[in-house]
Amino acid sequence: MVQNVASVMPELEPEDFHLLSGVEQGMRFSEYVNREKLTEFSRLSAENVDYRLDRCEDRELVERKTIQYEGFKLTFEGYDALALHTFVERDTIEGFGAPLGVGKESDVYEVQSYKPMALKYHREGYTNFREVMRERDYTSDRDHVSWLYTARKAAEREYEALETLYPDVSVPQPIDTNRHAIVMEKVDGVELSRTGLEPEQVVPILELILDEMQTAYEEGFVHADMSEYNVFVTTQGVVVFDWPQAVPTDHENARDLLRRDVDNIVSYFQRKYPAEVGDVDVDAVAEALATESFDSLSEHTD
Ligand SMILES: Nc1ncnc2c1ncn2[C@@H]1O[C@H](COP(=O)(O)OP(=O)(O)O)[C@@H](O)[C@H]1O
Ligand SMILES: [Mg+2]
């Protein structure tokens, strides 16, 4: 598990961040950055590099290996510290709060700004990366797979989808992004998977979700990871979140992914509320969503 870096932030000095960003730069070329290169990457003296490396290693922000040469890489905590530092410098964030959720591929925390926000650190590449490393000779840099890159790309894709879709689609308002992290509006709601809907709410809520999917499609995106875990039910309606896998509608698999999304969400409702949701023609619903002609579920049920 990746530790919360917020508690070490107050101890870090500006030059510690120079060192961390030096390691980050070096990681574009190799998984472990040679200590000797760090003076150049961080623009610190050799003594200062040594001093900062020890401080950062003590706080588990960097990891050392000494095999062919003495090298260092950022840990996820180190990468988190860099992103968090940037948000603080830009005045995006003023304070750090409690965890909001630990997902498969992210850690989400409440942060304080002019109002409470959610900070999501992407972790894509983390688990895969460890599997990859088990199978490989890890002294080799040849197939250097960078989790930094994977996680950063995921954040970029999610932020782009949020920026395109907000506010026409009910998604968290995007506020800022840096590296593998995004800051967005904090949603006050309950995950669909944890709600027990009243019988009369069931079909209207499902229709609201399908409506959001239709608008997202119109605006150019298929969510592609639609499930009861990625929808909040709020007092206002629904909010669809977790968009890093979103696929543009001109992608060759877009229609298949849309159908799969519809199937996932409809199947969940059918399992949980069989009396309210009967047989649904999933193909017809997906077709209607893609052609902007979805109106109500009853048109597509037996
Ligand atoms: N904007 C938000 N406001 C409040 N809680 C959030 C927000 N975004 C995510 N969360 C919480 O964090 C958890 C993980 O976020 P999610 O975006 O689904 O990432 P993952 O890809 O790891 O599933 C969610 O299940 C939810 O409880
Ligand atoms: Mg999720």
Image (tube, helix red, strand yellow):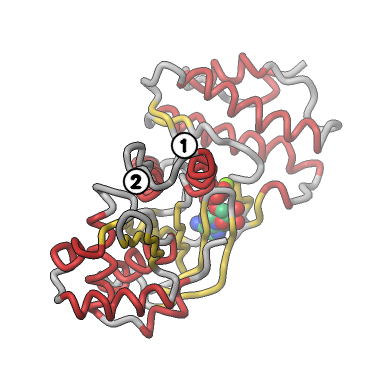
Relative vertical location of residue 119 with respect to residue 299 in this rendering, above or below:
below
Residue 197 image point, x, y percent: 77, 47
Residue situated furthest bottom in the rendering: 11
Q: Amino acid at mark 1?
A: Gln
Q: Gap between marks 1 and 2, in whole Å?
A: 15 Å
Residue 202 image point, x, y percent: 74, 39
What label does residue 149 carry, if any?
2
Residue situated furthest front in the rendering: 68
Q: Amino acid at mark 2?
A: Tyr
- The quarter of the displayed image where residue 278 is located: top right
Residue at image coords 37%, 77%: 94
Instruction: Determine whether, in the image, residue 148 is placed left or right of residue 96.
Output: left
Instruction: Determine whether, in the image, residue 35 is placed left or right of residue 263.
Output: left
What label does residue 266 carry, if any?
none
Residue at image coords 52%, 31%: 224
Relative vertical location of residue 167 with respect to residue 9 in this rendering, above or below:
above
SS category of the residue bearing label 2:
helix
Q: Nearer the viewer, residue 17 or 301?
A: 17
Q: Nearer the viewer, residue 300 or 23?
A: 23
Q: Nearer the viewer, residue 82 or 177?
A: 82
Does the Cβ of the disc 2 residue fall within 8 Å of ligand 1?
no
Q: Quadrant of ligand 1?
A: bottom right
- Which quadrant is the C terminus positioned in? top right
Q: Residues within 10 Å of mark 2 (few under 14, many from 20)?
A: some
> In this orientation, does residue 239 appear?
no
Instruction: Determine whether, in the image, residue 177 is placed left or right of residue 22.
Output: right
Residue situated furthest right in the rendering: 275
SS category of the residue bearing label 1:
loop
Tally of marks: 2
Badge 1 is on which residue?
245
Relative vertical location of residue 43 with respect to residue 302 in this rendering, above or below:
below
Residue 282 image point, x, y percent: 65, 19
